Amino acid sequence: MRKGLSLVGLSLVVLVAFSPVPVSRAEGAVRVLQNRASFRFSQNLSFSLVAESDQEIKDVALYYRRRSERVTSRVAPQFTPGRHVEATFKKDLEPGEIPPGTTFEYYWRLSLADGTQSDTPTQTLLYDDDRFAWQTLQAGNLTLLYYGEGQAPLAQQLAQAAQAALARMQSQVGVTLNSPVRIYIYQNSNDMRGALAARSEGFDERVVTLGVAVSDNTLLLLGSHTGVEQTIAHELSHIVVGLATKNPYSPVPRWLDEGLAMYAEGSLPAENLRAFNDAVAHDRLISVRSLSGYTGDASQVDLYYGEVYSLVDFMLRTFGRDKMAELLKVFKEGTYPDDALRQVYGLSLDGLDAAWRTSLGLKPRTTATAAGPAPTVPKAGTAAPRDSGGGALCPATGFLGALGLLLAVGLRRPARSA
C-alpha cells in the first residue's frame, strides 16, 4: 500500500500546467529569504520557503513536476497568512517510486492582499541515488554510472556491449537511440534493491532483479551477474523500442517488444532454443495472437522467448529491416496490431502466424487459438532466482521454492523495464 503524501500542514494536490508568471516587481513585492528543496533517497522529497512582503501574503502554493512530464502537482500547504510566512511541503516516497536521475522543476506562487501574484523563479532539484559516490563513463548517448574501486573495467566492458547492441538494432532493425540514457551499475543486489519498487517480502527474498528500465531514459543494472552483457542489450532494446513507438493510445505488442529485445542480445540462449525446437518438432507452438497475452502456463516461458525471437527473426529475414522500421513508426501513431500489420505487411496477426509456421515447415493452424493461451509473461525487469547462475530470461521473474520454479509478474513499463 502506498503511503501517499505526508505534509507539514494540510495540503491539496491537483494537476495543472507548469506555467510560472514573472516575479512581481511592484511595490509590496515578495522578498524570498529562503527557498530550498532536498531529498532522502527512496524516503522523501522536501520543499521549504520563507518569504516576506510589505503587505499581507494571503496564499502560498507550490508547483512542482518531473522535467520529463507535462503535468504539474499543485500543493497548498497550511501556513499562517501575514507579512512573514513560512511554508513547508514533504512528500513521503516508496522505494523505487522515483527513478534515480530524475530532475524536478518547482516554483512557489504567493498571492498578496491587493490581489496580485508573485512567482519565485523556477528552480531544479536532481533526485539521485546519493548513497554511493558515482563515477561516470560517457559512450555516445549513454551515461554509465558506477561506484567502488576496480569497477572502471566493468563499466568499459558494458559500454562496449551496449554500443554493440545499439549498433545491431540500428543496422538490423532500423531503430536508433536519439535520446540520452543513464545506466546505473550496482555492485550487488542489496545495493540495487534500495532503488527498486518493493514487492512482497517473500518475493524479494527469493528474487534477484538483473536489470530493469525504470523510465524512458533510466536503466538499473546488476553488474555482478554473469549474464550482464545480455541483460544490458535486452533492456536497452526495450528503451529504444519504447521511445520509437511511444504514444498515448496503445503500447507496442508484447511479442514484438520482447522479440526485438531477445534479438538485440544476439544469439538465442540454449534453453529457449531447446524449448522452441521441441515445440516445432511436435507442432505445439503458441499462436502469434496468444503471444500478446499474459495468462497461461508458466512452464512455457522458455518457449515464449524462443518463439518471439524466431518470429522477429522471420520478419526481418523475410521482409527486411525497412519494413520493421516502418512497422514501429506505425505503432508510434497508436495503431492497433492487426491494423498495423495489414498496413505494413499486408498480413493480419493470424496471417503472420500462418506465414511464420510455413517457414518452419508447419501447416497453418486451423484456428488462431489452437495452441491455447499464452504463458505467464511478466511485464518488467530482468530477474532470476537468487541461486541461479545461468542466463536469465527477461522480463521473467522467477524464484525457487518447495513447489519448484515459479514465475511471477514483475514491475515494468509503463515501467517500460522489461
Image (cartoon, rainbow, N blue to C red):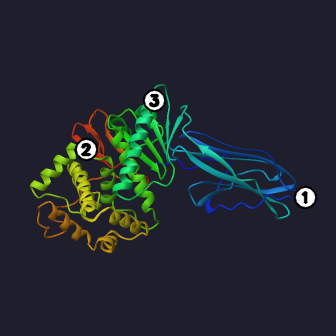
- The residue carrying mark 2 is 406
Question: Quick check: 43 left or right of 117?
Answer: left
Q: Quadrant of the rendered structure where residue 223 is? A: top left
In depth, the one of 225 and 75 nearer the eye is 225
Question: Quick check: 266 left or right of 62?
Answer: left
Q: Which mark is residue 27?
A: 1
Mark 2 touches mark 3? (CB < 8 Å)? no
Dot 3 crowding, Cα within 10 Å, few <14, some 14–19, many 20+: some
Residue positioned 77% across, 60% down in the render: 22
Question: Quick check: 152 left or right of 51?
Answer: left
Disc 1 is placed on an element classified as: loop
Given the image, on which type of amino acid does mark 3 rest? Gln
- The residue carrying mark 3 is 151
- Residue 393 pos. (x, y %): 29, 45
- Residue 68 pos. (x, y %): 56, 55
Name the residue furthest top: 149
Spatial separation of the CA atoms under disc 1 and disc 3: 57 Å
